[in-house]
């Protein structure tokens, strides 16, 4: 975020909502519930590591090569689990949805349709 102090717990994209909550809303006593509606991987963002690509499916081989998981799906779910652990630290976050499910032409590299059972298993595993 331009002209902002760097913090280890928030960045310009990941956990950026913390800037608004910690710098503006919390000091004013205005903390409101938050739902993050489009979580996931978006390769369109510039100045980032990794290969060219758009949605999470374009980065699977790269993540597996870095040891992020045994398969592209596992690597993506591991990243979502990391994000989930982070948002769980913020009591005002109700949850997040992963972009995108459904038959939407042009967004195939973002599609989570065929990994919904894997995501459901992750969610069920969190009910402990």
Image (spheres, rainbow, N blue to C red):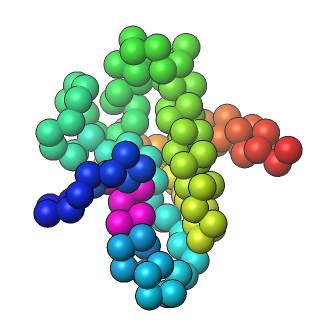
On whether residue 91 falls in the magenta region, the answer is: no
Q: Position of residue 52 (x, y in %)?
A: 20, 30
Q: Quadrant of residue 21?
A: bottom left
Q: Is residue 14 visible?
A: no
* Region rendered in magenta: 13-19
Q: Position of residue 58 (x, y in %)?
A: 33, 30
On whether residue 16 falls in the magenta region, the answer is: yes
Q: Position of residue 125 (x, y in %)?
A: 79, 39
- The residue under the point 46% across, 14% down is 67
Between 107 and 95, the residue placed more toward the observer is 95
Q: Position of residue 70 (x, y in %)?
A: 55, 14
- The residue under the point 43% across, 81% down is 27
Q: Is residue 91 left or right of residue 83?
A: right
The image quadrant where one finds the N terminus is bottom left
Q: Is residue 1 left or right of residue 121?
A: left
- The residue under the point 14% across, 63% down is 3
In the image, farthest residue toward the right: 128
């Amino acid at each position: 975020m331009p002209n902002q102090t760097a913090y280890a717990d928030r960045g310009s994209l990941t956990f950026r909502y913390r800037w608004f909550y910690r710098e503006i809303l919390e000091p004013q006593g205005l903390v409101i519930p938050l739902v993050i509606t489009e979580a996931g991987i978006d390769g369109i963002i510039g100045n980032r590591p990794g290969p060219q690509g758009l949605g999470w499916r374009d980065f699977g081989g790269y993540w597996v090569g870095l040891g992020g998981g045994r398969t592209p799906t596992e690597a993506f779910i591991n990243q979502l689990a990391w994000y989930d652990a982070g948002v769980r630290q913020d009591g005002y976050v109700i949850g997040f949805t992963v972009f995108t499910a459904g038959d939407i032409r042009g967004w195939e590299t973002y599609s989570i349709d065929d990994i919904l059972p894997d995501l459901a298993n992750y969610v069920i595993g969190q009910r402990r």
